[in-house]
Image (cartoon, rainbow, N blue to C red):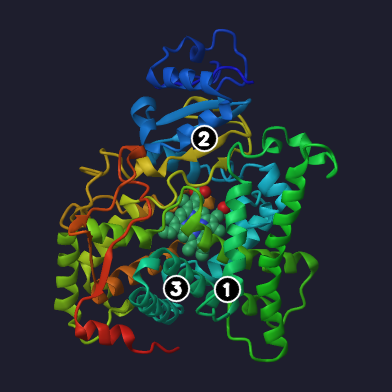
Amino acid sequence: MAGPVSCRRQPLPRQTGSDQEVTCALPSRPQGSSPYRKHRRHALCQTLAHLYRMGPEIWQVTYILSYPSALPSFLGDISHVEVLGQHIIILNNVNVAMEMLDKKSSSYSDRPVLPMGGELVGWKNTLVLLPYGDRFREYRKNFARVIGSRAAMDTYHPTEEIETHRFLQRVLAKPAELSQHVRHTAGAIILRISHGYKVKEHQDPFIDLADRAVDQFSMSTATGAFMVDMIPSLTYVPDWFPGASFKTKANEWRVTLEEMVQKPYQFVKDQMAAGIAPESFVSNLLEGRTLSAEEEHIVRWSSASLYSGMLASLRGRRTVSAIYSLFLALTLFPDVQKKAQAEIDAVIGSDRLPNFTDRDSLPYVEALAKEVLRWNVVVPLAVPHRVAEDDVHDGYYIPKGTLVIPNIWFMLHDPRTYSEPNEFRPERFLGKAPETDPRSICFGFGRRICPGLHLADASVWISVAMSLAAFDVSKIIENGVEVTPEIDPSSGTISHPKPFKCSIKPRSAKALELIQQDPVY
Ligand code: HEM
């Protein structure tokens, strides 16, 4: 069991001269009577001390990190906890996150080493857990080439429009299966882009495989789930050793992951050999080249990172899909829905569905898409960055190996940035003084910023525009009573919608006709 959890709220004295001792914000270097030690314990310390008595510290952090909204009022802009000797900093202020993670990105862009999920199962080969270094740069270059800008995304607009149209058809046919349709559509879009693969309508083998792998990713990287994450030397115990069942599990999950990487890759190679491969991320990287083993590793794993990244963004343990949240917002806020539909009707009319050429003419729809990304934060605590070398940041000593977690949830609900932050109000992004664009926050920071951000942005926008043009979304009536979706009160705010029911109906006979038209490539 580690020592007591430490934390601090007020800034400690800063370093003011070169011969002056650097203030140690984190206590890894014992410094006698460090100012940190003298610091007054406040409410969160007491909360932590209370939790400390309740169980192993790793659970305390899991608990705390499950409630990102609870942190800042206790902790201020930078908070620190120590768990089993691991320093963790939580950033609750967007400017501090930019100063640290953007401006000093060469030192703040590594990822934590996760013995179970990363090392034993092998997820450290995908971009999200890949250590910072040459391979990382190669993966990111590949991502940037394919989906790294709004202009690059123009190539994929037809894919987005057609697949989102098919999403409308699936929702029309089975509205109760909304979340499955969201996942299936995301898989259809990304597999087209990454491997030129057209998914099957039901039980697609690649989507099922990726779904299983992403589930196993969540299980294998869950905080505190495996002892080997706390005692990494257990990695080396033989598989037959009593209590080493985690190794059997890791081997099983490794096979799924390898299949998820290899099968779609082989599909492209076979199609290229037969001369029938459509253009894709993988075919572009393979075309006319003889690859070294290292180059082949990079193509296989960066393409797998592309599509597992997209699916993981829809269904990680603490993630909420933006499109699912859209339907929740439309159910809860009928006035917002009506206003957006009125804009679409005025600009586009009712004879066709919106497409990307309409984007600049639909400011309210744009604002609604932004509000969806702000209101129900998709990745509330981003992914931890690991500090690669000792640093002194704004007077705080930050040792190598510290994990830095941007509290994106709070940044997007910070009353200093967003007025009435818990309200769903697209108008905040309109007018002469619009509030901060949430897309500058919700995709993370520095060299680890989400490489799928332009794809995500385009997918969210087209889904918002087409869904609003096609459907009326409202509360369901059960036994004569209108049912308001229950909102998970655990965070004290609307941040994690539970599965909910809503009524989704075509807006008109004309809308029904448009949904039923056959979208073709
Ligand atoms: C609304 C949708 C999405 C949101 C809000 C989102 C958000 C994020 C965030 C916050 C991070 C961590 C950034 C950091 O460490 O500072 C991240 C990383 C990542 N995202 Fe996304 N993401 C979304 C969609 C996507 C999509 C569509 C893809 C794939 C096409 C994707 C692929 C990835 C990958 C591979 C990483 C790891 C990057 C790295 O470690 O270098 N994401 N995302």
| N-terminal label among 1 and 2 | 2
Give me the residue at 59% from left, 8% from top.
32
How crowded pointer 1 is (Cα within 10 Å; few <14, some 14-19, many 20+) is rated as many
Q: Secondary structure at mark 2?
A: helix
Q: Residue furthest front?
A: 479
User: Disc 1 on helix, strand or loop?
Assistant: helix
- Is residue 23 visible in the rendered image? The answer is no
Locate residue 15, reporting x and y percent.
49, 21
Mark 2 — residue? 62
Q: CA distance from mark 3 to mark 2?
A: 37 Å
Q: Is residue 153 visible?
A: yes
Instruction: Give how far apart the Cα atoms at labels 1 and 2 are.
Output: 34 Å
Q: Residues within 10 Å of mark 3 (few under 14, many from 20)?
A: some
* Residue 71: assigned label: none
Identify which residue, 296 or 175, lies in the foreground.
175
Amino acid type assigned to the residue bearing label 2 in the image: Thr
